[in-house]
Amino acid sequence: MRTIAGSAVGAILATLPALADDPHADLPGLIDEALGYLETGLPV
Protein backbone atom coordinates (compact mmCIF):
# COMPACT_ATOMS: atom_id res chain seq x y z
CA MET A 1 0.00 0.00 0.00
CA ARG A 2 2.85 2.40 0.75
CA THR A 3 4.26 1.82 -2.72
CA ILE A 4 0.99 2.82 -4.35
CA ALA A 5 0.60 5.89 -2.15
CA GLY A 6 4.23 6.87 -2.72
CA SER A 7 3.91 6.60 -6.48
CA ALA A 8 0.75 8.73 -6.46
CA VAL A 9 2.36 11.39 -4.29
CA GLY A 10 5.48 11.29 -6.45
CA ALA A 11 3.44 11.78 -9.61
CA ILE A 12 1.65 14.74 -8.05
CA LEU A 13 4.94 16.26 -6.88
CA ALA A 14 6.31 15.88 -10.40
CA THR A 15 3.72 18.44 -11.58
CA LEU A 16 5.15 21.19 -9.37
CA PRO A 17 8.01 22.22 -11.72
CA ALA A 18 5.48 22.75 -14.52
CA LEU A 19 3.38 24.84 -12.17
CA ALA A 20 6.44 26.85 -11.14
CA ASP A 21 7.22 27.57 -14.81
CA ASP A 22 3.65 28.65 -15.54
CA PRO A 23 1.67 29.81 -12.48
CA HIS A 24 -1.50 29.86 -14.58
CA ALA A 25 -1.15 26.21 -15.61
CA ASP A 26 -4.11 23.91 -15.14
CA LEU A 27 -3.06 22.14 -11.94
CA PRO A 28 -5.96 19.63 -11.89
CA GLY A 29 -5.21 18.82 -15.53
CA LEU A 30 -1.51 18.31 -14.80
CA ILE A 31 -2.30 16.03 -11.87
CA ASP A 32 -4.81 14.08 -13.97
CA GLU A 33 -2.20 13.59 -16.69
CA ALA A 34 0.44 12.47 -14.18
CA LEU A 35 -1.89 10.00 -12.51
CA GLY A 36 -2.98 8.78 -15.94
CA TYR A 37 0.56 7.57 -16.54
CA LEU A 38 0.33 5.48 -13.39
CA GLU A 39 -3.09 4.18 -14.36
CA THR A 40 -1.78 2.88 -17.70
CA GLY A 41 1.15 1.12 -16.09
CA LEU A 42 3.69 3.94 -16.44
CA PRO A 43 4.63 3.66 -20.12
CA VAL A 44 7.99 5.25 -20.87
Image (cartoon, grey):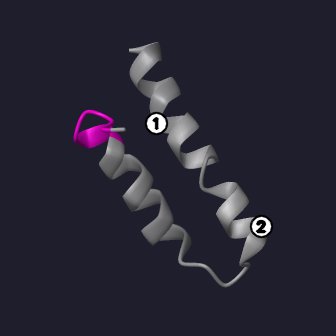
As drawn, which residue projects farthest toward the front?
A: 44
Q: Main secondary structure of the magenta part?
A: loop
Judge depth for marks 1 and 2 and give the one in front.
2
**Residue 22: image location, x then y, percent:** 71, 78
> Residue at point 73% right, 79% down?
23
Picture quadrant of residue 37: top left
Q: Residue at x 47, y 29 (%)?
A: 7
- The tag on residue 31 is none
1 or 2: tag closer to the N-terminus:
1
38 sits left or right of 17 in the view? left
Q: Compared with residue 12, is residue 29 higher up or lower down, i.e. above or below?
A: below
The image shows residue 30 at horizontal and vertical percentages of 49, 65
Q: Is residue 9 above or below residue 4?
A: below
Which residue is found at the position 38% from the left and 60% from the top? 32
Residue 41, magenta (yes or no): yes
Residue 18 lies, in percent from the top left, at 66, 64
Label of residue 8 in the image: 1
Give the residue at mark 2.
20
Query: Is residue 12 found inside the magenta-colored segment of the image?
Result: no
Task: From this view, report whether residue 8 is shown above or below residue 26.
Answer: above
In the rendered structure, which segment of residues is drawn in magenta?
38-43
**9 in relation to 15, above or below:** above
Nearer to us in this view, 1 or 22: 22
- State which quarter of the image contains the C terminus: top left
Which amino acid type is marked by label 2? Ala
